[in-house]
Image: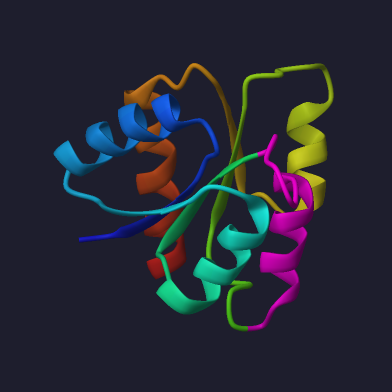
Amino acid sequence: MAKVLLVEDNEMNRDMLSRRLIRRGFEVVFAVNGKEGVDLARSEKPDIILMDMSLPVMDGWEATRCVKADAATRGVPVIGLTAHAMSGDREKAIEAGCDDYDTKPVEIDRLVGKIERLLGAAKG
């Protein structure tokens, strides 16, 4: 069972997304801000991170840069999530270190496809 670190400050989004991921067989660990996400990436050793970009304390852009700068977590794939799908956001997410990017509201089948592709690439 793959472990997903879901870094999301909105309780409704966290609840909805985690229930859908658990139903599909993933183990889900939560963080509610970017700093907590970076700390849990180190301590929980997730297989993949779903990172909201608009977070309190430390935003998702900076949290992703921290995860990718740390030798212990550098190899963990990160999918950036944002409701603010502006032109250039995908490029900005990839620049910050995200391995992929998705928009909210999340389309679960599309997101799970991206998760499975990145997990397969990480193993292979």
The region drawn magenta spans 53-71
Q: In this view, does 22 lie above or below 122?
A: above
Q: In this view, does 31 lie above or below 11?
A: below
Q: Quadrant of residue 64?
A: bottom right
Magenta region includes residue 55: yes
Q: Quadrant of residue 103?
A: top right
Instruction: From the top left corner, tell me how far across and down residue 24 is, in percent.
Output: 18, 39
Instruction: From the top left corner, tell me how far across and down residue 82 is, in percent.
Output: 63, 27
Depth order, front residue of 51/108: 51
In screen coordinates, is 42 left or right of 120?
Answer: right
- The residue at the point 77 percent across, 60 percent down is 65
In screen coordinates, is 47 left or right of 72?
Answer: left
Q: In which quarter of the image is residue 66?
A: bottom right
User: The C terminus appears in which quarter of the rendering?
Assistant: bottom left
Magenta region includes residue 73: no
- The answer to whether any part of residue 124 appears in the image is no
- The answer to whether any part of residue 43 appears in the image is yes
In screen coordinates, is 34 left or right of 22?
Answer: right
Depth order, front residue of 1/22: 22
